[in-house]
Amino acid sequence: MTSRADYDLIVVGSGIAGLYAAIQAKEEGARVLVVTKAGIGEASTRYAQGGIAAAVGEGDSPEEHLQDTLEAGAGLVDEEAARILVYEAADRIADLVRYGVQFDSSNGEVSLGREAAHSRSRILHARGDATGLEIELSLSSLAQREVVILEHTLADRLLVEGGRIAGVEVFTRTTGEHRIYTAGTVVLATGGAGQMYRTTTNPLISTGDGVAIAYEAGAEVLDMEFTQFHPTALVIPGQPVFLISEAVRGEGALLFNTRGERFMTKYDPTRAELAPRDVVARAAVREMAETGAAHVLLDITDRDDAWLAARFPQIYAKCLEAGLDMARDRVPVSPAAHYTMGGVRTNTWGETTLPGLFVVGEAACTGVHGANRLASNSLLETVVFAHRAVERLLHPPSPVPPPPEPATNAIDLAPLDPDGHVPTAAEVKELMWQDVGIVRSGESLQRASSTLRRWAASIPRPADRDGYELRSIVTCARLASEAALLREESRGAHYRTDFPEPLDDWRRHIVFRKDAAGGTA
Ligand code: FAD
Ligand code: SIN
């Protein structure tokens, strides 16, 4: 059954990016609808631990934050976007506080944590290691009072009329119905695609739906070869992967291999455990291979139970649940897919190449993370660019500026090549983990590319949420593996054994657009 309802703005997703955008637009008098595919609070945001980066501490400056962001990003950061990120940070933190978020403080001063590749302590956190939960609960309780929110409602297709966004088609899980909602503007805030990997810190909702439906609708997708792998996840068979925040290393935790040797000083003598994530994740993989173990060990036993329980209440409790007392035991950790640096290409106003379509948060690629995101810059990016997107869509300058120019050198995915095998999500995730993981090669990428090309052709028309999510995972996996195959170098989170060094020629982006004419990016 199809019915119609008109809004000024439809926001897809109820993590920090979607809720913040919806609340801001409603404050300005817009008629806003939020659709979200699970319960309102189910989003990556809820699980964020370390915090949100902002140069608000004494002696810190946006310029220093910018330098750290550029350095972590390994030569691919868009400097203009990153400058906006760090200079608008303090105002957006003030918005979050206005919306009810209470950051941790001590003696009246906000407490600032330290994370890898930051040259100083600049991470605001809440409830110790439950920053995301505090943000998600604050924004969702405000949004529930202010805007119309449809839960368990999955956006499965973008409507495009005359080359402009006209609304979304949704699938409602509880009734099995499809509906169409019309609006001149859609803001996708659907989060990342960590679920395309077997081992990930991301929740089940992170299936890259926004990237997949935007690509299908003709928007450009950028840099999907760059997935960030977090080095320290607690992986217990049969249980969801649980992140052990980088903030634990920020408080002095050290990494050892299972032979008891501290190893990070060998890979990065200066920064050691606080080297960028890609460096630490690859070092952990190497140590695991050399020792034959499935993990390395994180040691913060120089702190006592009371301190750990106060500073990292969730992590400390989770470890105890697993039979580990962080004050006495070294914690077994291994890398896990954590963050999707690539996404739908946007300009610094959240605009895509498809008029009327804005994308914010982890689903977007604004260029601020380049090839490797600096810790705690993600939550910051969501609010900085959601704010700018709302500003632009509600107050477009006159005359209305054209959307970003499409890339002249965008490429389309390789044609499908059916073999009749209908893949399960688990098969896709295993393939991605093995062949498009932390360490890749031309051979493994070629294998992933041709397998996915065959599997994509065999996926049946989705009939339920699992079906839609499988379709999204496969589209994102194809975009990631094709881009990784094209990028014949190593840079940031993309490491190829057959091209182990960065190459100047590859200081550029890979852009995919459906039905693009072809060529390299
Ligand atoms: P999400 O919070 O993932 O929200 C996406 C929303 O879209 C969800 O509501 C989902 O249900 C909905 N959705 C998805 N598809 C559809 C669809 N088809 N239709 C309708 N709704 C849909 N970053 C930091 O900066 N600091 C940290 O300390 C930090 N810690 C992290 C810890 C963990 C364990 C994880 C997983 C991530 C962490 N990150 C951190 C990253 C950060 O949390 C995310 O990048 C950020 O929360 C993304 O926000 P978002 O609003 O873009 O997406
Ligand atoms: C963490 O707490 O280690 C995650 C921080 C982030 O992803 O930025």
Image (spheres, rainbow, N blue to C red):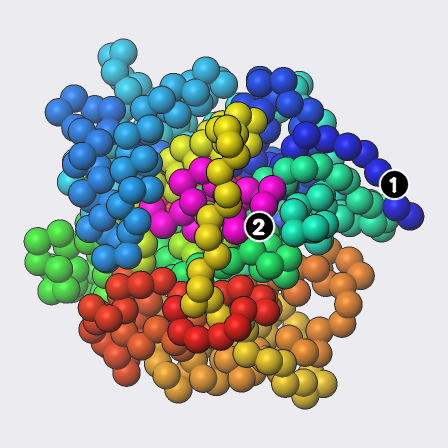
Q: Residue 91: give x, y in percent of width and height.
A: 36, 22
- Describe the element under mark 2 as helix, strand or loop: loop
Calculate the distance from the C-alpha at mark 1 to the C-alpha at mark 2: 25 Å
Along the viewing direction, whichever of 237 and 365 lies nearer the viewer: 365
Q: Residue 416: give x, y in percent of width and height.
A: 63, 81
Q: Residue 378: give x, y in percent of width and height.
A: 39, 42
User: From the viewer's perspective, is the residue at label 1 or at label 2 nearer?
Assistant: 2
Q: Residue at x 77, y 40 (%)?
A: 181
As drawn, 518 above or below 402: below
Left or right: where 7 falls relative to 376: right
- Amino acid on which the number 1 mark rests in the picture: Ser
The prevailing secondary structure element of the residues shown in magenta is loop
Q: Residue 225: give x, y in percent of width and height.
A: 41, 66
Instruction: Please name the residue that numbered disc 2 is placed on.
Output: 354
Q: Residue at x 67, y 41 (%)?
A: 36
As drawn, 250 above or below 137: below
Q: Quadrant of the C terminus?
A: bottom left
Instruction: Please name the residue that numbered disc 1 is placed on.
Output: 3
Q: Residue at x 22, y 48 (%)?
A: 70
- Describe the element under mark 1 as helix, strand or loop: loop
Crowding at mark 1 (Cα within 10 Å: few <14, some 14-19, many 20+): few
Outermost right residue: 1
The answer to whether the beta carbon of the residue marked 2 is less than 8 Å from any atom of ligand 1 is no
> In this rendering, does residue 301 appear at all?
no
Outermost top residue: 108
Q: Is residue 406 magenta?
A: no
Left or right: where 157 falls relative to 72: right
Highlighted range, magenta? 347-369
Crowding at mark 2 (Cα within 10 Å: few <14, some 14-19, many 20+): many
Along the viewing direction, whichever of 86 and 406 lies nearer the viewer: 406
- Amino acid on which the number 2 mark rests in the picture: Leu
